[in-house]
Image (spheres, rainbow, N blue to C red):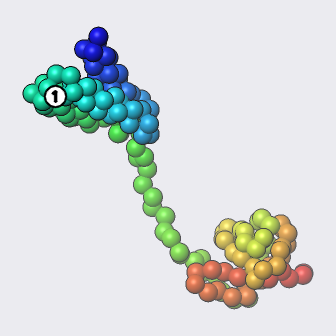
Amino acid sequence: MVTAIIVILILLGLILILLELFVTPGFITGLLGGVAWTYAVYKIYNDYGTTSGHLALGGLILLLIACIFIAVKSGVWDRVSLHQQMDSKVNLLPDVKIGDTGSTLSALRPSGKMQWNQISIEVCTMGELVETAAFVEIIKIENNKIYVKQISL
């Protein structure tokens, strides 16, 4: 009876670890498989002695290494990894200057988008709220932030 429980735990652990590697991304199924293997090894050490426990532990470690090797060779991570490269730049301001005007593309509460020379740029106000399609003027450029205020035309 104990042998059957140990074999079932080892197979269950193997199935859960393989599910983790090939099907479900995350952590839970692999953790449950590891817990099943740990309890199976504990039962082997407890019921069959240290020699059997060492052999089982070594076999399970080799089985885990084989599973990881098969996962790497089969290209599992290629199917779940991102293959696009980011080529945009951060903190680049368009060629705007104080006094330039445009209209808001979104409500500024207090930040949002503004259209300037057919370009959409991220702007913010000094705290006031500005509705969509309002005319605004650039009043300050500081720390890669563009500050605007509403104007009336």
Q: Residue at x 53, y 75 (%)?
A: 92
* Left-right relation of 151 to 38: right
The quadrant of the image that shows the N terminus is top left
Which corner quadrant of the image does residue 50 belong to? top left
Indicate the position of residue 127 as horizontal and vertical percent values: 78, 80
Label 1: how many Cα within 10 Å (few below 14, some 14–19, many 20+): some
Q: Residue at x 37, y 27 (%)?
A: 16
* Left-right relation of 5 to 54: right
Indicate the position of residue 79 as horizontal and vertical percent values: 39, 36
Q: Which amino acid does the dot numbered 1 rest on? A: Gly
Which corner quadrant of the image does residue 129 belong to? bottom right
Q: Residue at x 82, y 79 (%)?
A: 128
Indicate the position of residue 54 as horizontal and vertical percent values: 13, 31
Q: Which residue is mark 1?
A: 53
Report the number of numbered marks: 1
Which corner quadrant of the image does residue 75 belong to? top left
Residue closer to the observer: 10 or 47: 47
Residue closer to the observer: 117 or 152: 152
Q: Residue at x 80, y 67 (%)?
A: 107
Indicate the position of residue 125 as horizontal and vertical percent values: 75, 79
Which residue lies most toward the left here? 51
Residue 100 position (above or below residue 41): below
